[in-house]
Amino acid sequence: MTTQTIVRIQTEPFDTAAEAAAITRGRTDAGAVVTFTGICRGDENGVPIASLTLEHYPGMAEAEIERHVAEAIERWPLIGVTVIHRFGRILPGDDIMMVVTVSSHRAAAFAAADFLMDYLKTRAPFWKQVEKTDGKIWVEAKATDDEAAGRWAAPAKHQAAE
Amino acid sequence: MTTQTIVRIQTEPFDTAAEAAAITRGRTDAGAVVTFTGICRGDENGVPIASLTLEHYPGMAEAEIERHVAEAIERWPLIGVTVIHRFGRILPGDDIMMVVTVSSHRAAAFAAADFLMDYLKTRAPFWKQVEKTDGKIWVEAKATDDEAAGRWAAPAKHQAAE
Amino acid sequence: MGRNKMKLKLRYFAWVRERIGKPDEDVEVPAGVTTVAELMTWLAARGEEYAHAFENPKVIRAAIDRAHVKPQTAIAGAGEIAFFPPMTGG
Amino acid sequence: MGRNKMKLKLRYFAWVRERIGKPDEDVEVPAGVTTVAELMTWLAARGEEYAHAFENPKVIRAAIDRAHVKPQTAIAGAGEIAFFPPMTGG
């Protein structure tokens, strides 16, 4: 059974619900849909921000995300996976990125979405710069993100989640 | 900081995306939105089904879900939680229930949605009956659902997820 | 006087309801019946349909006044007691 | 003849790009430079802006031909090598 996958890197906004609907349309084996949407907050560590600018490494960003989507499909029985990540200038309240995972059962859909987010945070070549009243600063990577991604390293590749 | 919570038990369809948007509207502290949507599959253990009928215990269903939403809010820093569960006759491809969790950070949103789903599956008083070509049968509870819910029992109540 | 019968509303769901043949009923429970497990034993003796519904009490779940309870929970003070199979929502 | 210089395209992102002052450049690397770590050391000696960008090589990540690599990875055969800070997408 092939898994429908979509990976897009774009400046345009996206519609999480429409992407989720596109995967499940016409299928009767989809029982669980998990979506994650990352939104630009109005502050960074308590300091208000005016905007966020996302830089990325074209070509590598797509390849890296596609590699992790393929790994998720190898680990869990998925019907479809869509990942969309924006770049460029983003204002507080606007969506930054989204992941949708669809499976017959909820455990696989949850685990795959969680796994993909941890890997996107630590491995996908994107860098956030925030604009505050006193200038622009690059967001620093968090040790907790590396720890979160480390959760998925231990088990064997072909583990069953269901 | 109060957490916006909505719990609804209804026969009508719902719109997961609209519910998610309603929580984040006008807020600048929302950084992560996780949605789970449970869909009626076209088969039950490989046997095609014509429809699903959900029976529930009015009053207790709301109370039990609200109690678990309150527990999720105690465990994780959440901005908003919405749970909607339908009852009555549902056709393959139609949505059964949804959970939306919103937080400043993704770990809390993921954990809370996963936790709520495990508890809804095993503690919320709903019963599924599927209609197959040879008659109606009650869906049997799965041991794996009890095990999944058991994952959340061990840690202390006031654990921090971030 | 201290051994009065107890008045209760009982509710049944899913196949427990189907086997008993009604969604709810009002009963008067003898004073000797003090726990949820004893109530199931007493109910099972009320007729064939009850015997069928409660033939395997281990799989039946109970709620007192809309909160889950264990078989050993006392029924004193209860207004409404419900019996149902393990839940399958979500 | 076996010690020819190696031609490479270098790409820089985020504050590495800002410190060096350009997004990419073509370089000829001396034969003695064989690993990613050695390449960073060689680049750091090219001027003040490079010294600043690579002042703490431990925090710099690298990719060869768009795949993550470690500092000890050999650069032989590489077409494009990128340097950047830890990623903060998602």
Image: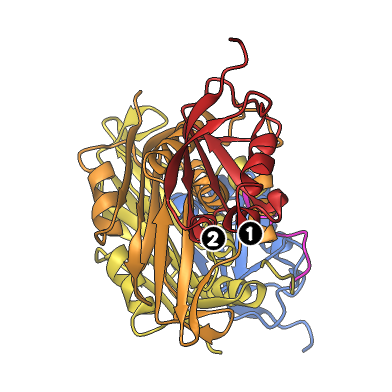
Chain colours: A yellow, B orange, C red, D blue
Q: Residue furthest left?
A: B26
**Which label was assigned to residue C19?**
2
Q: Chain of mark 2?
A: C
Q: Chain of mark 1?
A: C
Name which residue type carries label 2: Arg
What is the x, y in percent for residue B62? 38, 40
* A80 is higher (above) or lower (below) than B96: below
Q: Are marks 1 and 2 in contact (CB under 8 Å)?
A: yes
Answer left or right for B92 relative to D86: left
Q: Nearer the viewer, residue A60 or A40?
A: A40
* Residue drawn where x is 24% and y is 66% of the image: A12
* Residue drawn where x is 46% and y is 53% of the image: B126
Q: Residues within 10 Å of mark 1 (few under 14, many from 20)?
A: few
* C82 is higher (above) or lower (below) than B46: above
Q: Residue furthest top?
A: C1
What is the x, y in percent for residue B44? 53, 77
Answer left or right for A91 relative to D38: left
Residue A106 in magenta stretch? no
Q: Residue under label 1, please give it.
A: C52
